[in-house]
Image (tube, rainbow, N blue to C red):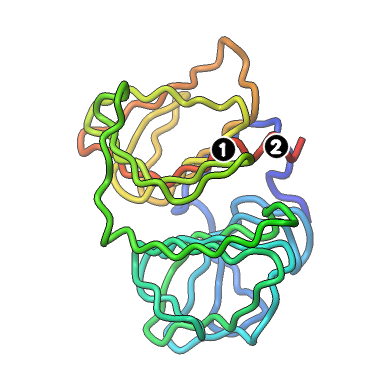
Amino acid sequence: MELNADFTCRIALHAENIDWQESPTPGVSRRMLDRLGGEVARATTIVRYAAGSRFPTHCHEAGEEFLVLEGVFQDEHGDYPTGTYVRNPPSSSHAPASELGCTILVKLRQFAPDDRTFVRIDLNKIEALAIAGREGVSVTPLFWDSRETVRVERWDAGTAVPLTSAGGMEIFVLDGSFEQGGDTFQRHSWLRLPPGLPADHNATAVAGSQGATVWTKSGHLRNLI
């Protein structure tokens, strides 16, 4: 299966326009954003666990990262409430479940083969940092290395935010809204910008009247082209 698998293209998707599809695991459904492969795939997906649903133990041969959007995600390593960011590197394994139900944004099979960094960050316990030279923007760093940078950013109302995308980037809206390239992005909208945008491309986002809180990942798409 190939879905939005051309990483040279700008992609804009809005969750409310994407149907939930049942997965092979009872009680687990998903909204697919991009995908390359079958049930074992390089993929970006919004996944919803019904209360009491669970996966059998499995290994992430090429890693996974996820952000809990609603509810509480669980595995044998702990409980992860709304606002928790997790990275499980290649060769790690776990048995996902959710007694109360949850929704997560998850990216699969996108790590460097030698990455062995586990990350567990509860955003509810960390203050965002103001960034010099970026008025109206505050940032919570989540992960960075030579390949990519992952963070949550808060954009104040009306703030114009240049979207640096030399290595490509993804933006997922957690709260509020912004406009870019003629589209309005609201809660659980997703924007993917390719590496090396043309000079005449409108690569500036403008936060809406309530501001915007977004999850961003940048630099990584250059490795896929």
- In contact (CB < 8 Å): disc 2 and disc 1: yes
Closer to the camera, 3 or 161?
A: 161
Q: Residue at x 63, y 74 (%)?
A: 23
| SS assignment at label 1 | strand
Q: Earlier in the sequence, mark 2 or mark 1?
A: 2
Closer to the camera, 165 or 27?
A: 165
Place residue 60 in its image quadrant: bottom right
Q: Return the x and y of residue 102 as percentages of the image width and height.
A: 41, 74
Above or below 174: residue 76: below
Above or below 196: residue 19: below
Q: Residue at x 60, y 32 (%)?
A: 168
Residue at far top of view: 200
Q: Return the x and y of residue 93 as percentages of the image width and height.
A: 65, 77
| SS assignment at label 2 | loop
Q: Return the x and y of residue 192 as percentages of the image width and height.
A: 56, 38
Q: Residue at x 48, y 71 (%)?
A: 48
In this figure, which residue is indicated by the disc labeled 1? 192
Above or below 175: residue 58: below
In this figure, which residue is indicated by the disc labeled 2? 7
Quadrant occupied by the N terminus:
bottom right
Is 112 displayed left or right of 65 in the figure? right
Place residue 80 in its image quadrant: bottom left
Q: Residue at x 26, y 35 (%)?
A: 130
Specify few, some or many for label 2: CA neighbours under 10 Å numbering under 14, 14-19, or 20 or more.
some
Q: Residue 14's mark? A: none
Measured Cα–Cα span from mark 2 to mark 1: 8 Å
Q: Return the x and y of residue 57 as percentages of the image width and height.
A: 65, 85
